[in-house]
Amino acid sequence: MSHRKDSNYSSLPVSSYLELQPHNDSSFDEPGERDYLGSKVVDDDYDDDFEIDIDNYPLVVVGSNHGSGVPGAVFNLTTTVIGAGIMALPATMKVLGVVLGIVLIILMGILSEISVELLVRFSVLCKASSYGEVVQHAMGKPVRIVSEICIIMNNAGVMVVYLIIMGDVMSGSLHHLGVFDQLLGNGLWDHRKIVILVVMVVFLAPLCSLDKIDSLSLTSAASVALAVLFVVVAFFIAFIKLVEGKIDAPRMFPDFSSKKAILDLLVVIPIMTNAYVCHFNVQPIYNELQGRSPQKMNRVGRITTVLCILVYASTALSGYLLFGDDTESDVLTNFDKDLGIRFSSALNYIVRVGYILHLILVFPVIHFSLRQTVDALVFEGSPPLSESRKRSLGLTFVLLILIYIGSTMIPNIWTAFKFTGATTAVSLGFIFPSLVALRLSHKWDLSHGEWILSWLMLVLAGIVSIVGVIGNVYSMQSKSQ
């Protein structure tokens, strides 16, 4: 590209991270076109190739203009969404009933997608490159620090849960046989800590050391495929048992007949709100999107939402139909016993081993935003992490050690999972995006519908958080008595 003497371009290092951005925010104030969430577009024929008048923008490119395509971004975002929480959904449907369970899965998916689009829109308008930056732009640095602490607690907690599940499924737990026990009998693999350490060194560390989230696109695609495999196998088993008349009629609506039933209802709702939280990875995925624009990222978000709703609804329904009132809080543990059909043992192995591989592939995607957030908090003002390989590897090493230690110390994963669902996950998915939109509405107008939706999400998230925490505390007290 040639440079004119009177141009506004400046010389930048080839390794620098660059992007096409307007000279100032006033370019967004010209009368013209917006998408339905208010993002300005150039003209009515705007397309996803981000073709714009380059003379009106400073040069912002990274040595090469390659990035992630829409499919790769969809797989990374879907993998962020579909983690260990999917295994808790059949138990939530047991409590909520089929009708309310399906309705909430769809409703939470739609609300989460709206909050993602608001986050993308205001991130672009504020020229923010991370979740924390857009929060700081709206509410100041102290709130940014709070949001980054929430990301660290949420992601680290989720990764600890993943390691514990891997260990329990492979080496067994107090009430369930492990895959290795069933296949090989007793041995060194009975020790969960050793099994987790081997998995971390052999599989997780190499994947977590990658610098770009786009590098995980293929593993994310495999992760989504494994989640779909679980759904297909569960539906296949449920269909056979239904044909053979071995499935009891499911509960269609919640049970309000006892205090315990009502308490269970209060405890599972935060799990449902936690199911779609992926907002901490939205910005990293957007940053690496080829020909990025809010419209293209919105398309990624909508495809992801539809895919996740289908997988979640199918998993919740098939798991609940299979095990009925015996459905456990982690439905994966139901698959260590005879399913009452032919090839039951083989299907059990397929489900459990497939899901362990799924978690191994989800783990580095969650780790990516954890590492980025810790770096932003601890090494504020330093060059981007992608430009310091030594700092990146050092952070990865330290975080993996701390997460491994956490997985050996926490006894009950589902209590921790419910608390994070009611606090940090709700905050990241709904509270912060709503506050960002409402606080910046004076600068970039929200439509009346968007304003109402933002307040609705904020109020609902607050109620869910308070009710979830109280319900969890009361539930723990009831069990201890």
Image (tube, rainbow, N blue to C red):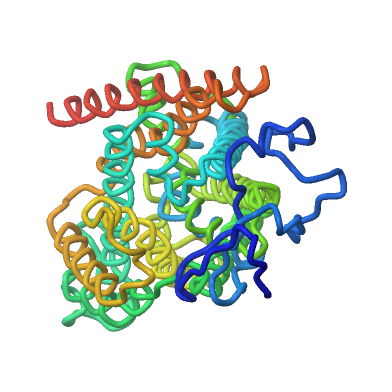
Image side of residue 438 versus residue 137, left or right:
right
Image side of residue 26 versus residue 200, left or right:
right
Q: Residue at x 25, y 79 (%)?
A: 201
Residue at the outermost front position: 5
> From what the image shows, is residue 205 above or below residue 467?
below
Q: Residue at x 44, y 40 (%)?
A: 134
**473 or 345, which lies in front?**
473
- Which of the 4 image quadrants contains residue 205? bottom left
> From what the image shows, is residue 10 above or below residue 424?
below
Residue 249 visible from this viewpoint? no
Image side of residue 72 versus residue 160, left or right:
right
Residue 274 visible from this viewpoint? yes
Q: Position of residue 263 (x, y in %)?
A: 34, 22
**51 or 306, which lies in front?**
51
Where the N terminus falls, by quadrant?
Answer: bottom right
Image side of residue 41 versus residue 298, left or right:
right
Number of numbered discs: 0
- Which of the 4 image quadrants contains residue 55? bottom right
Q: Residue at x 21, y 47 (%)?
A: 412
Q: Position of residue 227 (x, y in %)?
A: 54, 62
**139 or 4, which lies in front?**
4
Q: Position of residue 33 (x, y in %)?
A: 79, 36
Residue at the outermost right position: 45
Q: Position of residue 365 (x, y in %)?
A: 43, 63
Where the C terminus falls, by quadrant?
Answer: top left
> From what the image shows, is residue 460 above or below residue 72?
above
> From what the image shows, is residue 21 above or below residue 257?
below
